[in-house]
Image: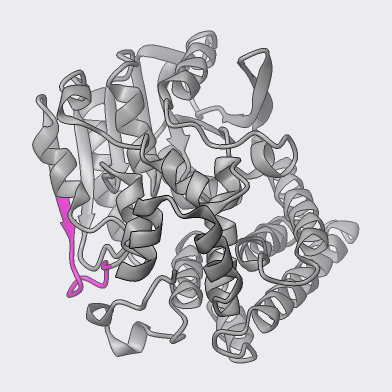
Amino acid sequence: MTASVQPGIGARSTLFADGAMNSMTRAMLGRVHVGAADTGETFATIDRIVDGDIGSWVTEWEALADRIADIGEECLRRGHVVSARNALLRAATYYTPVILMVDGLDDADAVLARAFSAHRRCWEQYLALLPDPPEAIEIPYEGSSMPGWFFPAAGEAPTKTIVLVNGADGATSYLYPGYGLEAAARGYNVILFDGPGQQRMLFERGIPFRHDWENVVGPVVDHALSRPEVDPQRLVLYAVSQGGFWAPRALAIELRLAAAVIDGGVTDVSAGWRGLVDSDRLAMFEAGDEERIAAHIRNLPAAERRLVTWRTKPYGQPRVLRAYRETLQYRITPELAAGIDTPVLIANPDEEGYVAGQPEELFAMLPGEKEIVHFTVAEGAAGHCEPMARGLAAQRFFDFPDDHVG
């Protein structure tokens, strides 16, 4: 159960034979565009990593993150606010590949707790050092709340607002610099949050994914519309990765949004799981042979066991078969899509890898105003969520809602 390197991406962009390591490294290099990583720091770190060795990966990224965090703390102590802010953002980013790969280590729980605590500390220090720091918010949610941030736009209120929806394992420390900064530069208020199964909701509160994301986006929209800074007619939804399922699911029910950007479209989360297993293992899944699946997983190579553990955990199910069955609810049907009348832009990159063909399927289902944008190998924009073409992606993605909300 591994993610393979896509050959069309090109040999010069293949930094690891291990598919997960290669994908995360490409994403890290894309973060250089917004100052959330540095090219030299990234290459110096991956040069020390043994391809496919999880322990090596975790050790080197955590060492880099710790070192850059120390630089940020020292700059802050000496009163160099801009230098401290920049270093702390990079440090927060560098803890994320530790968090994403820790499963499979003997001391995974301890490393995860340590790395996530450090990640959150650096991220929140960075936010506090911004010229106009955001407001920490708790969005009411089923008798509890979802943690998030409200970044007010510069200028007069009320104004247009964008709600950012993360994917299965993304961190808010990338969601804001990677997407929110681009929105802020265009005059948007920005709301980001951890929903069920994401980051703080999973690691700190133990709340898993749910498929009916209208029950997540609805409370976020309620919160947005309660704020005087928000123009209720100019509310935009922007979703990435597995958010490409959650967003259309929400849009079919939640009708208060003026436009949506989906990077990229997902119609069947379970298909992505099936695409990661060979035919023998898929037969076990379809037969529901839980004990045989568990025995098989115990004998997998460490990298594959790690991926199974990581992908299973956010669903709140103790075994992979039960998590897979949970994903069968994560589908967009033509009947559901028929309820979407929000103008939607969908990304469709070459070498999608995880949900190949699904952006086109979602596009075909949508009955209203819609646009599909192709990202190509020749543009350097191939791969899931266009990891190394962040400037091009921002231009294409944000021009669409700008055309609808000004």
**Does residue 312 appear in this view?**
yes
Q: Main secondary structure of the magenta part?
A: loop
Q: Is residue 267 left or right of residue 239?
A: left
Front-lying residue, 29 or 402: 29
Residue shown at the point (45%, 23%) measured from the top left: 217
Front-lying residue, 2 or 340: 2
Of the 4 image quadrants, the one containing the C terminus is top left
Of the 4 image quadrants, the one containing the N terminus is bottom left
Residue 372 in the image, given as x and y percentages of width and height: 14, 45
Query: In the rendered view, how is the structure colored?
Result: one colour
Rendered view: 211 above or below 328: above
**Does residue 185 appear in this view?**
no
Q: Is residue 268 left or right of residue 58?
A: left
Q: Is residue 386 left or right of residue 296?
A: left
Residue 112 in the image, given as x and y percentages of width and height: 75, 59
Task: Verify whether residue 377 appears in magenta.
Answer: yes
Rendered view: 284 above or below 297: above
The picture quadrant where one finds residue 142 is: top right
The residue segment tinted magenta is 373-382
Residue 121 in the image, given as x and y percentages of width and height: 79, 50
Residue shown at the point (54%, 11%) measured from the top left: 227
Task: Verify whether residue 12 appears in magenta.
Answer: no
Front-lying residue, 275 or 284: 284
Residue 212 in the image, given as x and y percentages of width and height: 42, 25
Rendered view: 147 above or below 243: above
